Image (cartoon, rainbow, N blue to C red):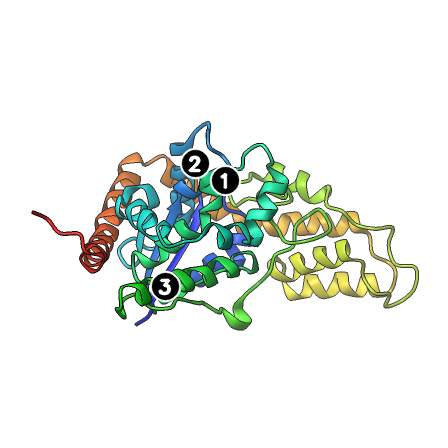
Amino acid sequence: MEIVLSGIRSTGKLHLGNYYGALLNFVQMQHEHKCFFFIADYHSLTTHPTPTDLHGSVKQVLAEYLACGLDPEIATLYVQSDLPQVPELYLLLNMNAYVGELERCTSFKEKIRKHPDNINAGLLTYPTLMAADILIHKATMVPVGKDQEQHLEMTRTFANRFNRLYKVDYFPEPVAYNFGKELVKIPGLDGSGKMGKSEGNAIYLYDDPKTIRSKVMKAVTDSGPTQPNQEKSEPVKNLFTLMRVVSDPETYSYFEEQYSSCHIRYGDMKKQLAEDIIRITTPIRERIEEILANDAYLSQVAHHGAEKARESASKTINEVRQIIGFRNF
């Protein structure tokens, strides 16, 4: 059984892209592999060093993980900062990570372009912390998007470098987990790209019906087709992609026919799309609210997950210390 690890930053609520792109697969995956799912609150500080409510964000994401179907009795579900072994391995890996390779990281260059006033050491060494998250459990598979592939490659570099420097065959080379045909890319509402928190184009699982209707009705479209079977513009194609995922096949086919015959009314399509999204998200939102109201349950889940994760992490860090040469007197 492969060891699978995945994390999500605690800077915001989960959205439809998270749900269809990964979470539904995670729910199935937890029954097939040994899975670790964590809330990356350390990572969130690289771009949000002074969060207004870090604990509240962690609590929200934990409740949403649970509401989507992750089972803390089957998988290991924990908060990153509950594992002191992670920053220790992060420190040790940093001793053999080179500034040049970290500065060449594509995401680092992109972040400093977007946040020139917050070029901190944590941002530079983000790939090392990600490597520590993965290697602390000796994970063999990691579900990652295109924006994280370079970080995973760097994790393999750090793992191999450790093995080579200390002449051991200790850390495995983690590979990207491929969902194959099941992977769904959910587009944003702004007419381009994927749905995401930082892009401001997302529908969150916790959004109420009024908010969802407002967001969908503001989604970017065009002036409409002028000839039969005209190729769709990217914004319109995105709306149809969303509808294909959340609506009944008959509904999708109806609006496809309306578009092809130049009779499409985008307002009608958006109204239907909003109602179909509400139909899917309402049970999840209600479950999130139920879980958020149960502090005792959330505390129990967090403590149970931390215990299971620390058992795995402690074994790894103790063995790494022995390999490097740390000894107790």
Image quadrant assignment for residue 79: top left
| Amino acid type, label 1 | Gly
Left or right for 22, reference 159: right
* SS class, disc 1: loop
Number of dots carrying numbers: 3
Gap in angstroms between the C-alphas marked 2 and 1: 6 Å
Q: Residue furthest right?
A: 226
Given residues 59 and 127, the one toward you in this image is 127
Residue depth check, mark 3 versus mark 2: number of the one nearer the observer = 3
Is label 3 in contact with label 2 (beta carbons under 8 Å)?
Answer: no
Q: Is residue 16 visible?
A: no
Could you tell me residue 30's position as x and y percent?
35, 63
SS class, disc 3? helix
Q: Residue at x 45, y 60 (%)?
A: 154
- Please tell me which residue is depicted at 31% across the width and 66% down the height of the picture: 163
Closer to the N terminus: mark 3 or mark 1? Answer: 1
Name above or below for residue 78 compared with residue 119: below
Quarter that holds the N terminus: bottom left
Task: Tell me where residue 272 appears, x and y as whole percent.
Answer: 69, 51
User: Which residue is tagged 3?
Assistant: 161
Mark 3 vs mark 1: in front: 3
Instruction: Kindly identify the amino acid type of the residue bearing the numbered disc 2.
Output: Ser
Mark drawn on residue 12: 1
Q: 60 or 51, which is in the foreground?
A: 51
Distance of mark 3 from mark 1, alpha carbons? 35 Å
Report the residue at 30% width, 62% height from top: 138
Of marks 3 and 2, which one's residue comes earlier in the chain?
A: 2
Mark 3 and mark 1 in contact? Answer it, CB < 8 Å.
no
Disc with the residue nearer the chain's start (2 vs 1): 1
Q: Please tell me whether mark 2 sits on a helix, a strand or a loop.
A: helix
Which residue bears the numbered disc 2? 57
Residue farthest left in this picture? 329
